[in-house]
Image (cartoon, rainbow, N blue to C red):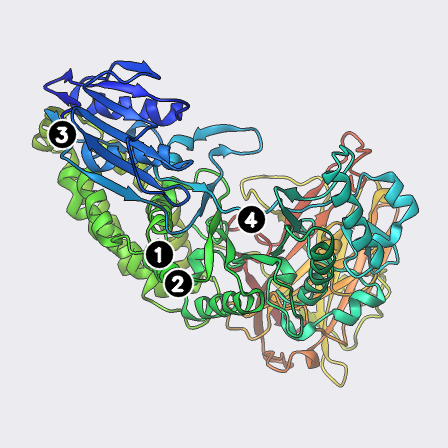
Amino acid sequence: MKPACDGKPLANLCLMGKVDALAVAELQRCLKLATGTELPVIKDEIKDPALVIGEVPHTEPLPPEGLVIQTAPHRVYLAGNGAGKTWAIYEFLERYVGARWYFPGDMGRSVPASRTIAVPAVYLTDAPFYRMRELWPVVSNPKTGTGTDMRGLHQALRSGNSWPINLQVHTPNYAKNEDYKKNRPEIFQLDDNGQRNYEMLCYSNPRTLETFLENIQKRLDGDKSANIGLISDTITVSPNDHEIGCTCPDCRKLWDYKAGAEGTASKVVATFTRKLALEMKKRWPQMTVLQLAYLNYTQCPEGVELPENVRVMICGMPGMALYSQPAIFDREQANVDKWFKLTGKKVQNWLYICWPEDRTSAVFLNPHTMQKYYRLNRDKTAGSFINGGGDHWQRQGINCYTWLKLLWNPDFNVDAAIDEYCRRMFGPASASMRKLIALQMDGWENHPWPTPRLTNRNVYQYSYPKATRDQMKRLLQQARAQAGSPDAQEEATRNGSSLILKRIDYYAAPFSDFFSEGEENDHPGPRTVLNIIRADHNPTIDGQLNEEIWSKAPPVALGPGQDRNQKQIKYPTTLRAVWTTGPDAGVTFAFNCSDTSPPRIKHPNIDRDHPDAIWEDDCVELLFDPSGKNEGDYYHFMISAGNGISDAHGDDVTFNSPGTRVASHVTSAGYTLEIFIPFADFPRALRPLPGKSIAWFGNVTRHRVGNYDRKNKVPGINDEYQRLNTTFAGPSNNLADFGPFRFVDLP
């Protein structure tokens, strides 16, 4: 059958029942681009010749989201099971119209011109291998629902979810329930300072389980006051978006420091999940418990047995891009294997496309790593929720495209698809762009780093060294020249597309920051240096900075923490440091943190190793690599204005520096803070000696909270984030920002 030929419609578009308007609009748009015509539309009636959507004369039962394309005399039927009806439209467009969708907007759509659209006699069915294939967000500004609209693109690539067990993230949250706060405070997390944290729950207290069960029953009874994560027959166990840090005796009995930064609280949450699941099995045997494995409860716990009505959704905390490092891939795969074995059921994946692009400008691509992951986990996962941050297509378009294709079919031919992408999108420049993309993939996927950590050194010396980046620059110049030649433009215009140069510019835009960051890595720009002066004795750690030695140590000022073009800060901070030799040798840091509203300085957290809680206080951070190598092995200390300490080795909060001492002092002008760190707690540290100058590398921050009482904000009093060095944007632990900590003698 021929739906269209020579710019004339030869069939009616017959819409039977409810059909997806976005898909139908895309069908008409692509037919017009291909043939110059649209099909006349008839609703709920078939008039031959017909392209019929939503009905077939006969088909075998289809799996969830299954599609069918079937011909009959004078007719082509597009139908399916559930969303399969929509997928049949896009399958028709891909297979018979030749349409492809590579990035948002008209510029990202590729539809070859054709005199005739013809469909041979066929009975074709297909269905997604993985039923969970969600790519989020669908607009580039998800908080406001505005910006680049990616809904049509995501749908064309069959982003969807028919998996019946679904998560309601970070729920329940009882922070606004005044009755619970007053009459059952024990269900809330007990922080180090002895106060209840109403944003978090205590998952060991029996009353918390009771509260869950009460709210489930309320919801089932139709009580609108119920607050519980219930979707269909699935109850969610998903703590609020913070690390668990309950210090009650029952939680601490289950605390597992040996499990590492991503497993300290795993047994706490899994034990609660077990208790909840067993009770639900008695009361509501048809229901399922779905637990999120995230933050410090990501790793599968040892010594916990889960009943058969439990499922798990695992967050891949490093971000899928870092799975290209074998050590990270193997670690994450081992966690999937353990959870799969523990539950005996397919897991779900929550994977991040936004990480680590928040900490590097590298134009990484890793579609082969994705394929390896999904082929390996065919029988272990139900699919993935892909967590982006905004418009993820310009920088990671090939990753996005192949990710969704692999979730539909893990045997999708990645390299053939990229060949086709280059040919369709870049025409006479296709060979140059294909070489560029090959360099992006090869650098990221085939060059293991000496240490599996994201550092600028690893990115720009191993994945994308200068020679590779120079080759990329030449290929982009070559591609633009090829696309811009008179013959190429004449051919492009004749074929109905003059978009090749614009497409190259779109693809190449992220390379500007990438090349700049690489150049800065090759030739590091100036860093503010912290000179640490030798003293003949350690200062008294009382927070007051009134000893003579502090007058001899030169102060350095912290600057803006995010925007390096910002010229001024509102609450100036200065830092000094001294070091000593002898039995109690170490380094002492002294902060002077000015503040216009000292009574509002927040500092209730007084105990150890709760970085999320300390971050909500007025606090400072010390990040340092004492080896002097600056290869990504660093320590991360957070100290609140109330002497709370979190000390970690990278992300591992199980590390403790027992000799560290801190003291703060609040004044009418702000607060001062002293932090002594002994060399003995870091056996691999490069130690200074009199007459021998050495350097560690690191960074320092201050987080001025101000309006910590978010309900009663005071106008003109704002948060402020400062850093010693802000060469690159990103979080505090962006290793690209580390500068020298020089240990020197007094002049």
Query: Which numbered disc flags the more N-terminal residue, 2 or 1?
Result: 2
* Residue 712 relative to residue 228: left or right: right
Given residues 520 and 465, the one toward you in this image is: 465
Q: Which mark is residue 366?
A: 1
Q: Name the spot of residue 501 as percent of width and height, x first.
A: 22, 33
Given residues 649 and 243, the one toward you in this image is: 243
Residue topped by disc 2: 324
Residue topped by disc 3: 118
Residue in the picture at 38% in, 30% down: 152
Residue 42 in view, yes or no: yes
User: Given contact means CB atoms under 8 Å apart, are the residues at marks 2 and 1 in contact?
Assistant: yes
Which mark's residue is nearer the viewer, 2 or 4? Answer: 4
Q: Which mark is residue 303?
A: none
Which mark's residue is nearer the viewer, 4 or 1? Answer: 4
Q: Secondary structure at mark 3?
A: loop
Q: Residue type at mark 4?
A: Ile
Q: Name the spot of residue 568 as percent of width and height, x first.
A: 64, 39
Residue topped by disc 4: 165
Label 1: how many residues lie within 10 Å, few (<14), some (14-19) or many (20+)? many
Quadrant of the rendering where the C terminus is positioned: bottom right
Structural distance between the alpha carbons of marks 2 and 1: 7 Å
Q: Name the spot of residue 582 as percent of width and height, x first.
A: 74, 84
